[in-house]
Amino acid sequence: MSIDLPDVADTTGQAAALDTQAAVEPKQPSMVLRRFLENRLAILGLLLFLAMTVFCFLGPLVYHTDQIHTRLSEQTLPPGPGHPLGTDQVGYDELGRLMVGGQTSIEIALGAALVAVVLGVVWGTVAGYFGGIIDSFMMRIVDSVMSIPALFLLMFLATMFRPSVLMLILVLGLLAWLAPARLVRGETLSLRSREYVQAVRVMGGRAPRIILRHLVPNVLGTIVVNATFQVADAILAIAAISFLGLGIPPPAANWGGMLSDGLNYTYSGFWWLIYPSGIAIIITVLSFNLIGDGLRDAVGLRAHRRL
Amino acid sequence: MAAMLEISDLVVDIRSGRSTVRAVDGISLTLDPGRTLGLVGESGCGKSTTGLAVLGLLPAGGKVTRGSIRIGGNEIVGLREAEARAIRGRTVGVVFQDPMTALNPTQRIGAQVAEPLLIHGMANRSAAMKQAIDLLGEVGLSRPAAQAERFPHELSGGMRQRVMIALALICGPKLLVADEPTTALDVTTQDQILTLFDSLQQSRDMSILLITHDMGVVAGHTDEVAVMYAGRLAELAATHRLFGGYRHRYTEALLESIPTLDTPRGQRLATIAGLPPNLGGQLAPCRFAPRCAHAEQVCFDMEPQWSEQDEHGYACHLPRRTDADLMTESAGAPS
Amino acid sequence: MIAFLVRRLLQAVAVLFIVTIMVFILIHRLPGGPARAELGVQATPTAIASFNQQHGFDKSLWTQYWTWLSELMRGDLGYSFKENSTVSALLLDRLPKTALLAGVSVLVAVLLAIPLGVVQALRRNTMVDYVFTAVTFVLYSTPSFWLSLILVLVFSVNLGWVPAQAPQGSIGAVLSQPSGLVLPVATIALISVALYSRYMRSSTIDNLTQDYVRTARAKGAATSRILFGHVLRNAISPVLTLLGLSLPFILSGTLITERVFNYPGMGLLFYNAAVTQDYPVLLAVTLIVAVATVAGSVFADICYALLDPRVRYAHA
């Protein structure tokens, strides 16, 4: 015998049952924003990113340097008047180069994340929506590409294509689309079996429409969080392939290239060629990792741990 | 005879972030040996917090701010952690609501049931396991020796709750706190579990603090009832007295929202309007007043005092009149 | 469990099969093809044609793939013209060294990460937690070669404690000079300790808030007993899973680290092969690395199933 009181537990129980749907409904953007802003580490990340962006993109407007013509008479000058961070092995002003190189690094990273997300969303949606054999096949391809560690694949591709900014964006994007593809495919798969999507179908709604209308808001959080981490990874990847000698050739500058050039002077004591670019990379990658971490918590994706 | 459990003027504050919520606000109750006290109320009324306070297991940020809790005459508020540990599991056992999550998913049942004996140094490993198997049989698991080797997810909900009960009783506690022990179970299993409680209570002579939101459970399986609302005690009486003549308007609302066999068909069940108040917010002097169908100005102006008569206490400005009241009134009224 | 294993292994084979096709096609699209890579830019068309004919490169891509695959099945990975050795012999020499480097690094990382994560979880939102969180985030955001370099500057150039170059020669030679392994291992361990300890921290926190922990406390268990008797086992299983899944991350780390320290492992072999377009080696190393990665994820699944009875029975 059980006679239930009008217990709030019951109403919350119903809410919880609805919650499985509510959880995938778009989260209140204002709430996400508030939770994000309450996260001090995330704010720190945001500030670091803003600082780096201002430094790289607005810095050159104030601090003019020649980053095209080499000046061999001024190579590897230590920091001093005229060159606050010294000059590099071909006489470029290190501080100015840090700004220009940062622009390239940030642009490539953002571009690559964009490519990865677009490709991943399309791939994942198609696989998840059609399901069955198409899904199995498409996901086995994702598994296969994933089974080759990124850096190996990156070197592979870098030997085949002449590195340029656009090429790096494409290559990095081609490596990074796997994670978003998996995430989106999972969401689509679960969305497909939801009653309301079924209902729309029964009422004659068209497939792509349903997917877009319901999927996009649902996976937006996942995608944004993932994209943020992609940017961080891309900056590190650019540095890694530059170090392996497959980066963009001069006079174009990027942090990874500067850093690996500087490494040749490790034993010469030219510390200004090693620390500034390394620290710039760390700050920028850190900022994206912090922002991503904060966003993930704000959106409530506990499962998507990365750090 | 000394009370098994004596709570007096207990105040529990729970701090989360910058705000503090007074989850339990000055409740007092007594549970005698061998008796069952039902602590009843809606979710968030503080009944579970009271139960956890008895165990010294308040959630993070929770703290007994005032009052005392005595178990078998010994004060437990303010005990050091090591002293509290010696009581937990040994003098006081506990059964939680959801046996699926309350049991460790990766440990075999026998080991989980036997663990309290090891913790309290009451038996060695093999003796503990043997006792655990015996007790599993006593709480109604068939082939207990085989079941002891299984994992929680391999049992049904009712069986898991029996395991939880065995785990709570293995050290032979004198007091059992049962926090919504049947809420997660289906109806037939609920009744079996409650009957098990009754028989175990008799064979082991222990006191049970039965926390529930289910008036039906209270009616059939308790000796006394304490009704809580928004952190306070609304009404406290022997079970048969309470059901015979409840006074508090909240108790009335609770009981009237239950369908009975003689509820005429087609009649709408009474419901309590609104939701329980947010304990962190502004509260009316009578906390139930905003939802009470009988509330008058006085309920919003001053706090109702606790009045007690023939061991039946309540705190209500405008109590429900019982049949006895009506009879006295009509007898006393000038004709 | 057996059925689960079989299904999982079949899936792994399918994945590896696709990998072989992908990599094979990619490599044969290298600019100039293998002949140009081998004979140099000045090679005459006749020389190229005869080279191609000699090595079967004039046949269709599928025929070549089939030949390569059937040789692979017989354990023949091809011949490296650049290194003048069979690829199998090269791998046999290099693979154990990379396995040693990766294995020791992961071991060190895990042994550091588990206590670190647990301490952070127990002291969460205190100064200790914040400091370690900051350190792990910064480590995770650091380019690994830069980290190596700082380690070299500090520990070999300034302090002179350990050599900056890895020992050369056979695996025996490498093992006989353990000091040369210190910095490569430290690099990979430091970067992965960030990943593992963070995971261990959140996994422990997740478990500490579970109801079964409250039950254990209600039994009267002390913190140490709750930790070692209940929480640790449940908290470690996702980390072991992560261990298997993080293999690609570790292998990428060895590629960089081997290059920095000139450590004669598979990563360095791959690097040199990429620079010289030594395609049989590229193909073989990529394949080995893919096998390792797939094996890592199978290992992760098995670990998970063994440690969590719920999964074990669900798949039984």
Image (tube, rainbow, N blue to C red):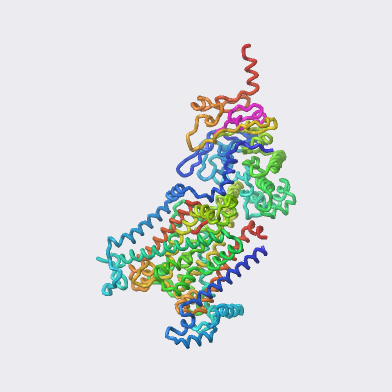
Asked if residue B102 is positioned above or below residue A241 in the image, the reply reads above
Looking at the picture, tell me which residue is in the foreground, B299 or B220: B299
Quarter of the image for residue A239 reads: bottom left
Question: Residue pushed farthest left?
Answer: A81
Looking at the picture, tell me which residue is in the foreground, A77 or A129: A129
Q: Is residue A100 left or right of residue C79?
A: left
Quarter of the image for residue B314 reads: top right
Looking at the picture, tell me which residue is in the foreground, A304 or A279: A304
Asked if residue B10 is positioned above or below residue A167 in the image, the reply reads above
Counting from the top left corner in percent of width and height, residue B147 is at: 71, 53
Counting from the top left corner in percent of width and height, residue C22 is at: 54, 72
- Residue B27 appears in view: no
Figure disc tally:
0
* Quadrant of the snapshot with the C terminus of chain B: top right
Task: Please say whether residue B249 is one of the residues in the magenta stretch.
Answer: yes
Counting from the top left corner in percent of width and height, residue B57 is at: 56, 44
Task: Please say whether residue B199 is one of the residues in the magenta stretch.
Answer: no
What range of the chain is rendered magenta? B232-255
Q: Is residue A74 left or right of residue A158?
A: left
Looking at the picture, tell me which residue is in the foreground, C294 or C102: C294
Question: Residue pushed farthest right?
Answer: B143
* Quadrant of the snapshot with the N terminus of chain B: top right
Residue at x-position 29% and y-position 61%: A61
Asked if residue A47 is positioned above or below residue B243 in the image, the reply reads below
Asked if residue C302 is positioned above or below residue B68 in the image, the reply reads below
